[in-house]
Amino acid sequence: MSRNRGIRRHAGSPAPAGRAGAFTPDSLSVAPRHLEIGGEWVSSFAVTGYPRDVHAGWLQPLLSYPGRVDVSLHVEPIDPVTAANRLKRQLSKLESGRRHTSDKGRLLDPMVEAATEDAYDLSARIARGEGKLYRLGLYLTVHATSEDDLAEQVAAVRALAASLLMNAQPTTYRSLQGWVSTLPLALDLIGMRRTFDTAALAAAFPFTSPDLPPADPTSVAAPDGVLYGFNIGSQGLVHWDRFAADNYNAVILGRSGAGKSYLVKLETLRSLYRGIEVAIIDPEDEYRRLCEAIGGTYIHLGNPEVRINPF
């Protein structure tokens, strides 16, 4: 049976007082697996399954999804004493299961063997103070402009999560709680969490930006190009590889004193750092100090003693 609850603000009803009114939707319709907020449709999911091994930036594909998806991580540290006791109980269960399987003459379960090895390794690292345990809740909210579009976006996001070996389950009959859990309110109303160690949690940090070039999945090397600075609009990093474009040329425009020369010198230094040869025509003798500081060659054009071999 499907139930639908609706909360709507009528024209004659007063709006919430203060600044809260600017963030309050005109209407809110609650369904088992989605919400209709004003003219927008949203559906929330809780990640219940994770890959056994994660790499740096393992959340990046979700964070760079071309549609609108809210990704919320709720992190709660676990006391070291509590973590050690939980690991002891988990190891006892795993060892008991292994002995029972061995006594019955059955084949060992590879999943149990892998879990036992991981538990022993984690317990040793915590005992040496090399890491801690945390409880992590990962929730997703997909936004769309219509119900049909929402179904397509949900299917695409769940397929993307599955390709990352993550199991995204809908917050059925808790759609409102799932949506609130992805708002920047630090409220976890779902409470579906998994235990992570320090290394796995640190690898989830979103070292990504829409201004950065997409990573090459076939290479582990850093992307080519130059880091220019921050985008004043998004505060993201601006990284550009001029040699990846069809035309390598660029024009820098700006008012006097805006930093045009500084930007050119910055690109020069960072290009040299990457092994790129740089030649500058300097009619105003502006780059002499930079050339001397990096051990470059400064050629005075027009000097009768200067000869340039173009080959």
Image (spheres, grey):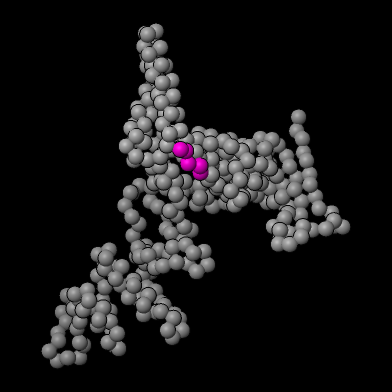
Would you say residue 225 is visible in this rendering?
Answer: yes
Spot occupied by residue 282 in the image (x, y as percentages of width and height): 28, 84
Instruction: Kindly report the secondary structure that dominates the magenta region of the rendered protein.
Output: strand
Q: Magenta includes 78?
A: yes
Q: Magenta includes 141?
A: no
Viewport quadrant of the C terminus? bottom left
Q: Is residue 30 above or below residue 249?
A: above
Pick the front one: 171 or 151? 171
Pick the front one: 2 or 201? 201
Q: Is residue 8 above or below residue 236?
A: above
Residue 282 shown left or right of residue 34 in the figure = left
Pick the front one: 249 or 163? 163
Viewport quadrant of the N terminus? top right
Seen at 41% across and 46% down, the residue is 202
Residue 224 shown left or right of residue 255 in the figure = left
User: Which residues lie in the magenta part?
Assistant: 75-79
Spot occupied by residue 122 in the image (x, y as percentages of width and height): 37, 33
